Structures are given as structure tokens and as C-alpha cells.
Amino acid sequence: MSDDLSRRDVVKIAGAAGVAAAAAKRVQGAPAIQKVKAANNQVQYGVIGTGGRGTYLLKHLRPVDNGRCVAVCDINQSAMDKAAQVIGTNPAKFKDYRELLSQKNVEAVIIATPLYMHFPVTKDALLAGKHVFCEKSLVFKPEEVHELRALANSRPKQILQVGLQRRYSLFYQTVKNMIQKGMLGNVTHIHAQWHRNPGWVMKQPPGPGNPQNWRLFRQFSGGITAELASHQIDVADWMFGVHPQWVIGVGGLDTYKDGRDIYDNIQLIYYYPGGRKLVYSGISTNAHLPYLGSTRPEFGECIMGTEACVEITVGDGEATMPTALWYKEVKRATFADPKDLKTKKDDVKMAGATFALGAGQRGFPLLMDKDNITGKESFLERELKFARRWLYAKGVLVSDEERNPVDVSLESFFNDCRTLNRPKADLEVGLADSTAVILSNLAMDEDRKVFFTEIEKLGKGGAQPAPKGKKA
């Protein structure tokens, strides 16, 4: 430990992590040992859209015991058959999602369709009286922002949750607690990136007629902004505790000349109240991540305050899990020799003429419950914890989250369906995120500064009042 990183600092970090963990346990229940819930207490759900993302969610739904898949839907029969096999509950199969919504035993739906279908399916599901978990982005067009807000607010007994899983990560919750406790000082800037190499590849046959290519065409997709940046825009909103005032950016279609019409690289700057900023980069030609000692690829965030910063990533949920490193601001080291400074005036002149750098340091891991010494461990358990903490301090290992936030978010959704508690990633979180996506793409397309107040006029002509009908 450096002199500038005191034991008190470490205790404060552990305390922030403890607050997040305690809050999560109140919502989720203790995850270590779970008994299979009685069938009549499980939420009966259907999955609409069983392509890559839908099948991924079904794999993560298998161990979640407070819900049971009773139906799946997709226009592709082979994808639907594979999804049914993955979940293993012998669900009913439908090619028309409206037939699935008509099933009385379906209490909730998980929507993992292409983006352009999110709103129509969500709208029909709410009108059918179902609880809804919809992948991000929640909506595709400006008019859908206004219409979905009106509709969802008219049905308060139905849960609507969006798939922004970072809100369900203990690491991200810990960092939010650290910010609230002032441990990062005044958080002024966030850098975020999602870099891939290659990006999305055009499937054969090429063109928008192949459903596998939907992400590459504007008639179906919000491009990199919707599919990737949306996660990290939400992180910035959450950590800053406020939404942006305006956005500028530049996008290019510079590498992939295969017929797509979305950008293959984007650079965005979001201006928040008080001069705070999110700087975002998304490219398709290099996957290097310059955070966390470059031990993780592609995506992550650097949250910077006047007293400290945190580098964090949610991981891919498979080979890598969420992790974070904390860096405290250290005293500046100067190359000027103090013995050569004869007067205060010289001191000022030298300070302006010499390099003054912060000392280098290793990031300190945010310790989760598994690494905290309680005094109740066996000798071997205690020694293993000390060994892990030593390896963290040396930068050999990083502390990973024990549960995938995707699992936690799905489990939490089913709990909320029963309790009607407000989800962490609720309607307004989802609509704010979708608004940022819509306006960011507009800023790049029109090469101008776009103010977030513009959403109040965009699409209002096409918005419809909440449909009348039987409320939940």
C-alpha cells in the first residue's frame, strides 16, 4: 500500500461495497443457496425473439428459479427449436407474438427482438396485461418515447424493465455509493469506449433482406449508438445523477464497404449540467481497452473525480465478470530541485516552467464480500483471502463479481412482478437512454449540437394518447 492509500481509505471502500451488497441482498435474497420455488410462486413467462440475444438470455434464465418459461416465439423455426432446447421446460412455440400474448398462463414477457420491433411488441404486451422485460434500447423512434410513457404510466400494476444490466452489478452499485459518499470528490468526466475488431460482419446473403443483418441497416437499427453506447450512456447518467443537456459527435462509414448504411465508428461528447462531460468512442477496427491494466478487451468506463477515479467494466458475463480498480489522486511530483528555489517568486516561476506529474500507482481493487476478513474463516479460508488480496495489490489478479448482473436483473424482474416494486432499470431509465440514442444519431447525421430538450417536440405529431381499455 502506498502512503497515500491509508487503511482508512480501504475501510471506506469496503464500507461502500458493503452498502451495495446489503441493498442487493434485500432485493435479491441470499444467492449462495437457493431452493427451487413452488411452481405456483414462479412467474410464468414467454420469450419473444429467440435469436442470438434471446437464446443468450434463456441460457441465463435456466438457473433463475423464480420464473418459468412456458412459451417462446420467433419467425425462425430452427432458432425457436434451439431456444426451447436451451431452456429445457418444454415451452409452447409460436411464430406470431400476438398468439403468445393471448395465452392466459403467460404473466410476463421478455422481448429480445430487433430494435425496430421493441415498441410495437412492448405496446401490445402492456395492452394484453403482461409484465414486460425489454432489451435496450427500449424504443426506436421519437414518437415512441412519448407514446410508451403515456401507456406505461396508465398501467401502474404492470412492471416494465429495460435490459440495462449494469444497474444490477454490485461493482457499479459500489462505485455509485462511493460517489455519493464523496470518495471520488467532484466527478467531472467519464470516458467510455466499446471497441471491436471486427465489428458486425455482413451475413450471407448480404443486404437487409437477411434477418441476421438487421443491425447494419437504419430502417431496423440504431447502429453502434443503440446496440453498444446505450449501456454506457446509462452509466454516465447514473453516476452523474442527471441527464445530458446536449450532445455533439461525428460518425463515419469508413472501413466496411459492404452495403450497410450505419456508421462503423462513432465519437460522441455529452455535456451535463455543471460542465460535466461523457466522452464516448465506438470503433470497429481495434479491440484494445486501455483500462484495468489492459487485462480486459473492448469495453469499459473511466469515472474521474477530483479526489480519485475508477476504471470499471461489466465483462462479458462468460469468461470475464464485472470488476473495477480505484485510483486515488496522489501528490504531485516535480522534477525541479527545491534547493534551487531561493524565493517564493522563484517557486512560482519554476512551478510554471517544470513538469509536475502525479506519482504512478497501481489501482486498488474494490473488495467484495468474498474477500473481506470476518474472523469466522477457517485457517485455510483466511490464508486464501490474504493471498487473493496480496495478488490484487500486486496487479496479478483483479476482484471479480460472483454473480452475472444479467442473472440478477432477470431474477429481480420476476421478484418485482410479484411485489410491484419499481425496477432499478425502469421506464424512465429506459426512455432517457433511448432519447440519448435518438439524439446522438441525429447529432452525427446533421453535424450539429443537439439539445436534449428537442425530444419534447420530435415525434409529438405522431404520438397517440394512451389506448383505452381494461387496466391491469
Image: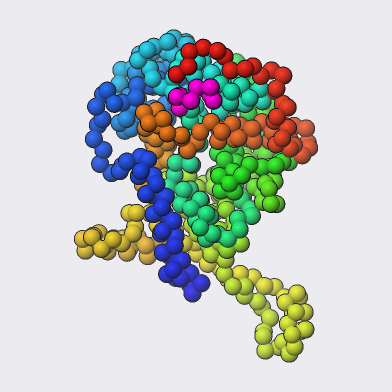
Instruction: Pick out the residue farthest to the left.
Output: 378
Task: State the image coordinates of residue 439 (x, y, percent, origin top left).
Answer: 69, 33
Residue 245 lies, with reference to residue 138, above or below; the image says below
Residue 380 versus residue 434 in the image, above or below: below
Locate residue 307 relative to residue 170 in the image: left or right: right
Q: Which quarter of the picture shows residue 345?
A: bottom right
Q: Is residue 249 visible?
A: no
Question: What residue is rendered at 55% in x and 39% in y?
Answer: 231
Please identify the quarter of the rendering in which residue 282 is found: top right
Is residue 157 shown in magenta?
Answer: yes
Q: Which residues are magenta?
A: 152-159
Locate the N terminus and report the quarter of the image it occupies: bottom left
Image quadrant where one finds the C terminus: top left
For residue 358, what is the image quadrant?
bottom right
Q: In the image, residue 184 lies at what x, y percent?
A: 55, 59
Instruction: Give the mark count.
Output: 0
Residue 248 visible, this orientation: yes
* Residue 107 spot, x, y in % from top left: 38, 20
Left-right relation of 221 to 451: left
Residue that appears at 41% across and 22% down:
108
The residue lying at 32 percent from left, 30 percent from top is 66
Report the side of 72 relative to 295 (left or right): left
Residue 122 drawn above or below residue 284: above
Q: Is 207 situated left or right of 111 in this image?
A: right
Q: Name the one closer to the observer, 82 or 45.
A: 45
